[in-house]
Image (spheres, helix red, strand yellow):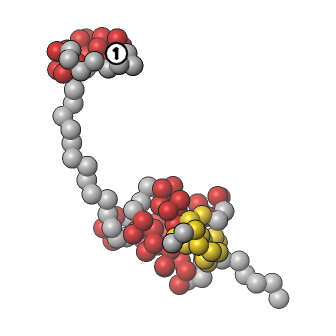
């Protein structure tokens, strides 16, 4: 960052006037956002690592909706739902209820005999 850009950054106020030539010279070009992966395989992260991270979040934070889990893990809802289906099949987590149309999940608790 050159000196003019640093000065403009320091002197910018809440109004953020876009007409300054120095400011327009300092702007970075917009980079298109990459689409988020819509499946576990497209994340290029080992599935067992994603499952362990999801289980860790459920262990530390307790019952979560899949949307909350998605936000916490910074993964798309489709990926989190796929992880949830795998964990549910392995009986590592269970559905506790619904919030709207979204599952509320928690770690599976073994029934006491």
Using the image, determine if residue 4 lies above or below residue 46.
Answer: above
Relative image position of residue 41 (x, y in whole percent): 33, 71
Looking at this view, name the residue that lies furthest to the right.
Answer: 113
Residue name at image x 66 percent, y 62 percent: 62
Relative image position of residue 30 (x, y in whole percent): 21, 38
Residue name at image x 64 percent, y 58 percent: 61
Residue under pointer 1: 12
Evaluate whether residue 20 shows in this view: yes
The answer to which image quadrant residue 45 occupies is bottom left
Evaluate whether residue 52 shows in this view: no
Q: Is residue 86 left or right of residue 39?
A: right
Mark 1 Cα shell of 10 Å, populated few (<14), some (14-19), many (≥20): few
Relative image position of residue 85 (x, y in whole percent): 48, 79
Q: Is residue 44 left or right of residue 26?
A: right
Residue name at image x 65 percent, y 58 percent: 60
Relative image position of residue 14 (x, y in whole percent): 39, 19
Residue name at image x 63 percent, y 70 percent: 106
**Helix, strand or loop at disc 1?**
loop
Q: Is residue 11 left or right of residue 24?
A: right
Quadrant for the C terminus, please.
Answer: bottom right
The answer to which image quadrant residue 31 occupies is top left
Of 51 and 25, nearer the camera is 25
Quadrant for the N terminus, please.
Answer: top left
Using the image, determine if residue 19 lies above or below residue 101.
Answer: above
Q: Is residue 89 left or right of residue 75?
A: right
The answer to which image quadrant residue 19 occupies is top left
Of 102 and 42, nearer the camera is 102
């Amino acid at each position: 960052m050159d000196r003019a850009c640093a000065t403009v950054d320091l002197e910018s106020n809440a109004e953020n006037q876009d007409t300054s030539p120095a400011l327009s010279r300092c702007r970075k070009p917009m980079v298109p956002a990459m689409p988020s992966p819509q499946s576990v395989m497209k994340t290029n992260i080992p599935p067992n690592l994603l499952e362990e991270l999801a289980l860790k979040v459920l262990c530390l934070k307790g019952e979560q909706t899949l949307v909350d889990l998605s936000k916490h893990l910074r993964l798309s809802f489709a990926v989190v739902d796929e992880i949830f289906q795998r964990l549910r099949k392995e009986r590592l987590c269970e559905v506790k209820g619904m919030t709207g149309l979204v599952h509320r999940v928690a770690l599976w608790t073994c029934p006491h005999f």
